[in-house]
Amino acid sequence: MEQLTRTEDGASLGSLLWRAGEGWRMISNAVLGGGIGERAWVLNAQVAHGYRRTDPDRHLAELARDAGAHGPGVGLMTAADVRAYGTGHDGGVTAVATAGLGVRGWAADWTEAAATAVRPGTVNIVVAVPAALTDAALVNTVMTATEAKVQALVDAGLDCSGTPTDAVCVAVRRPRPGEETHAFGGPRSLWGSRVARAVHQAVDAAAHA
């Protein structure tokens, strides 16, 4: 993972770039490269507080291109200082998290929020799994990673399930001939349990950074 720095509107801002290369399938809710598909890189870009651009997907694509990232990828945004990232490792799974928790809260809020422009996510999680998973298992790993994030935040004494704009990206290997493709990603499955522990470590470290 590379740490990059750029100057934008007079501010020094950082980014984290993982050049995964070929052979990876990713699932994400990111504004750039979201959904499920083959992706070659993941960019977690810091933006200024009070971010005003209404085309974050184009902005992220520009940043990735400037960094020399080629092919399809995933782009995440955060107002947090990405240099204060946390990492977690478990059984071959690696997780990286950045956490800006200034606008945190609980997912079930009984007040209706007005529609607003996309804001930069403040808890961003990227997970790499060195195994092939089905699409259903990929969706399951996102659930598992989210549950582990909430567990880590509560364990850290924070009164929240996250922020309104959190993002996650889970990367798994593209299936190869003769290789097992795992059908489960829940917290008691082989790879799901490892994802949960790695994400918990990463979010806990980022929350305390």
Image (spheres, helix red, strand yellow):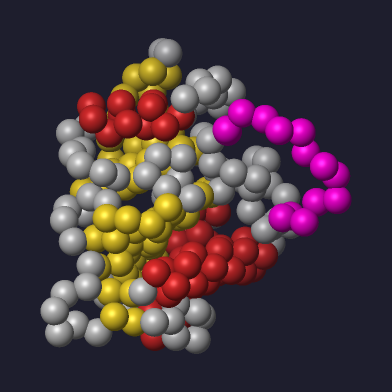
Residue 169: x %, y % from top left: 41, 55
Residue at the image point whose x is 61% and y is 28% from the top? 117
Is residue 76 left or right of 122 when viewed as pictured?
Answer: left
Is 112 one of the magenta-colored residues? Answer: yes
Q: Is residue 82 visible?
A: no
Residue at the image point whose x is 55% and y is 54% from the top? 207
Q: Is residue 127 visible?
A: yes
Residue 77 higher or lower than 53, as above or below: below
Residue 181 higher or lower than 11, as above or below: below
Residue at the image point whose x is 47% and y is 67% from the top? 139
Residue 8: x %, y % from top left: 38, 18
Is residue 67 left or right of 10 when viewed as pictured?
Answer: left
Is residue 163 left or right of 186 when viewed as pictured?
Answer: right
From the image, give the main secondary structure of the stretch colored magenta: loop
Q: Residue furthest top?
A: 10
Question: Over which residues does the magenta segment extend?
Answer: 106-119
Residue 28: x %, y % from top left: 43, 53
In this view, the residue in front, 67 or 97, is 67
Residue 195: x %, y % from top left: 42, 72
The answer to which image quadrant residue 20 occupies is bottom left
Is residue 163 left or right of 85 when viewed as pictured?
Answer: right
The answer to which image quadrant residue 9 occupies is top left
